[in-house]
Image (cartoon, grey):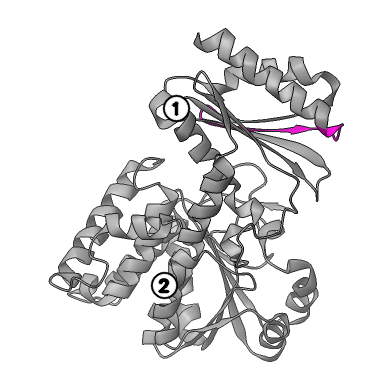
Amino acid sequence: MIKKKLFSDKSFEANVYKFISDINDNSDFLFYFSPDPDAIGASIALSLYLSRKSKNSTIFLPDIINPNLDFLLKIAVYNNIYIISDLEEMLKLINNKNITVITCDTPSHYLLPDYCQLKKNFHKNNNICFIEIDHHFSGDSEKIFKNSLCLFKKSNSTSEIVAEVFEMIGRYNDYDNYIDLMFPRNIVLSLLVGICFDTHFGKFVIDANMFEKWFELLSHRLVNLTWGNKKYIQTAEEVFNKINQISLSKKKVINKLLNDMVVINSIGLLILPEYNKYDSLSDDGDPTCILYKIIPDLTNMSAERSKKIGIVAYYDDSLDLFLIKIRRSSMFNSFDIRKIDKLLKKIFKKNFLGGGGHEGATSFKIKKMERSQFIDDLKTFQNQLAVKFFL
Ligand SMILES: [Mn+2]
């Protein structure tokens, strides 16, 4: 593993100039990344720019992605950007062309879809030019491809880095009105998706200057460029709401599950029946209702509905153990829920396999045990919590 390193401003700038010449020298680009809204926003922004330069861009998305991002994919398709999901097609691209592979917002090769099947072909084709753009530096964050050109920078999102790159390209080409040229509406929209998502609309910001600079500029531009056109997304807030929308069927599934939650003194406990982790819980098979995809929303809503703390427990049939997710509600945000780890450990004793999290959200593993015993222990946990902390 090649540990990811932060560049000085000067070497980042030098790499952007190399990036500009790589773009000019090549005509086919393949976006390969771990899909999340920031990765998709940054990749679509770049591919829209490449399209305007009459370059070919393909985006590899093998799995179904959050349907809230459909509007962004539609913009891509409308601008002649190919979206492929088929592994064979991907292999063809890697083998046959002088392709440039761009990986955005992906800290480790473990997160790249189908990497094991593709690895060999990446190595075989010596002509591939790799470009990595990312803002993750902690833990096992790595430079994924050995000879890649890296645009790593401290920022709140990869979309902010792409915005910086666009600004430099604009200035480099000495455009008088480079903001207008480099930031048309669709690019503004794509970048705002990444920035709003990764910062939770400005709630989690590690570099305030970067956030203020780009959020201000792009959100004002979005308003100005859309003004008067009511049927389109007009503000950054609408972008954020759009990407966080819960689909109707997901809402229905979550509410139905939450009906079985038992609340004692504002502490809610929901033990899910045994489901397959990858099965959709919706009658129509809606893929956004697959159990492991709804768990984050389900736990958040369990906390809100209970008023203080929500506990959601279920059996994970692929890990072969029980998982317990604990969240605090937004009204109860002065309490650090990590304080209750000890109680869980005390009750589950040797079956407690550890876990952790942050002050508002934790997650724990419990060894496979008799289901009835697991339920009894969890109820004890809930009762003791209700008495100890909140009477
Ligand atoms: Mn990101």
Stretch in magenta: 358-371
- In the image shown, does 95 or 111 lie closer to the viewer? 111
Asked if residue 309 lies left or right of residue 76, the reply is: right
Across and down, in percent, residue 116 comes to 79, 67
Q: CA distance from mark 1 to mark 2?
A: 35 Å
Q: Which residue appears at 35% of the width and 55% of the height? A: 240
Foreground: 207 or 204?
A: 204
Q: Is residue 130 magenta?
A: no
Q: Is residue 360 magenta?
A: yes
Find residue 241 and report its image quarter: bottom left
Q: From the viewer's perspective, is the residue at label 1 or at label 2 nearer?
A: 1
- In this rendering, does residue 42 appear at all? no
Amino acid on which disc 2 is placed:
Leu
Q: Which residue matches tag 2?
A: 72
Q: Amino acid at mark 1?
A: Lys
Indicate whether 23 appears above or below 205.
below
Q: Nearer the viewer, residue 45 or 304?
A: 304
**Tag 1, which secondary structure?**
loop
The answer to whether residue 264 is above or below residue 28 is above
Q: Identify which residue is drawn at 41% across, 91% down.
A: 54
Task: Check disc 2 and report its element: helix, strand or loop.
Answer: helix
Number of callouts in the render? 2
Q: Which mark is residue 307?
A: 1
Check disc 2: other Cα within 10 Å, few if <14, some if 14-19, many if 20+: many
173 with respect to 177 (left or right): right
Q: Residue furthest left?
A: 228
Q: Which of the two discs, 1 and 2, labels the residue nearer the N terminus?
A: 2
Q: Residue at x 59, y 58 (%)?
A: 289
Left or right: 37 in relation to 179: right
